[in-house]
Image (tube, helix red, strand yellow):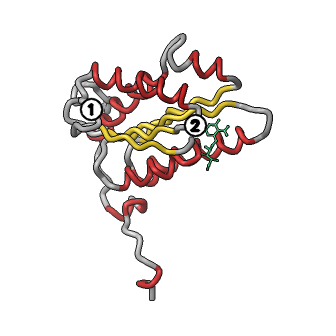
């Protein structure tokens, strides 16, 4: 039998997209730096004008999953990395945004078969977020490692026997084409 395990040695040929929320960009820009640093040190050309990494900026974490799903459906990427920072405030808003982005990012991966990395910090304070975005460690690095590992692992796994088993990849007919 087989043991499937991702490696980090095909990084120079893989293609990635990074979706970044502008909300709390003090934090998300730092996550992006950590992410790019890791990819670069594994041989990925992170230049936005290069041919390995595309970047999509969205208003906030709530929008991240929609864009990640669309990018994944394009079939152009080996992994998508979602970066955002949801920080608890005085109202329940945090809970709604955090719940939707976590469900949405998971759904984007399930529906498309493309690894979609959950790089969304959910913290009680800006201090906690900054500590995870460079002051103590930078989780952007870890998110990039997950993308490298998962892109390699998915490339090794057996493909679905039938394209119909991947409903997310079925073309959507316009309403007017339905009988
Ligand atoms: N977006 C975030 O990324 N982090 C937050 O902490 C946040 N809070 O707390 O409001 C936030 N809100 C914006 C949201 O993601 C959407 O962009 C907005 O609601 C428009 O759809």
Q: Is mark 2 within 8 Å of ligand 1?
A: yes
Residue at 58 percent across and 15 percent down: it is 131
Image location of residue 43, percent across then percent down: 23, 24
**Number of marks in the image?**
2
Residue at the top extreme, as displayed: 136
Residue at the right extreme, as displayed: 90
Q: Is residue 63 left or right of residue 72?
A: right
* Up-down relation of residue 136 to residue 16 (above or below): above
Q: Which residue matches tag 1?
A: 47
Element type at marker 2? loop
Residue at the left extreme, as displayed: 13
Element type at marker 1? loop
Residue 166 location, quadrant: bottom left
Residue 84 location, quadrant: top right
Q: Which residue matches tag 2?
A: 23
State ligand 1's quadrant: top right
Gap between marks 1 and 2 measured at Cα: 23 Å
Q: Is residue 155 left or right of residue 21?
A: left
Determine crowd level at label 2: few under 14, some 14-19, many 20+ residues with C-alpha closer than 10 A. some
């Amino acid at each position: 039998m087989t043991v499937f395990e991702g490696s980090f040695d095909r990084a120079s040929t893989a293609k990635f997209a990074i979706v970044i929320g502008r909300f709390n960009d003090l934090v998300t820009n730092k996550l992006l730096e950590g992410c790019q640093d890791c990819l670069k040190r594994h041989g990925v050309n992170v230049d936005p004008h290069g041919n390995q990494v595309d970047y999509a900026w969205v208003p906030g974490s709530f929008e991240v999953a929609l864009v990640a799903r669309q990018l994944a459906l394009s079939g152009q990427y080996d992994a998508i990395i979602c970066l955002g920072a949801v920080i608890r405030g005085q109202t329940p808003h945090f809970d709604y945004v955090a719940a939707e982005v976590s469900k949405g990012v998971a759904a984007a991966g399930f529906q498309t078969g493309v690894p979609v990395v959950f790089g969304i910090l959910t913290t009680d304070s800006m201090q906690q977020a900054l500590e995870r975005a460079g002051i103590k460690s930078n989780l952007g690095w870890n998110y990039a490692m997950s993308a490298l590992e998962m892109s390699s692992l998915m490339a090794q796994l057996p493909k679905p026997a039938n394209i119909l088993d991947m409903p997310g990849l079925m073309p959507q007919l316009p309403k007017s084409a339905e009988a």
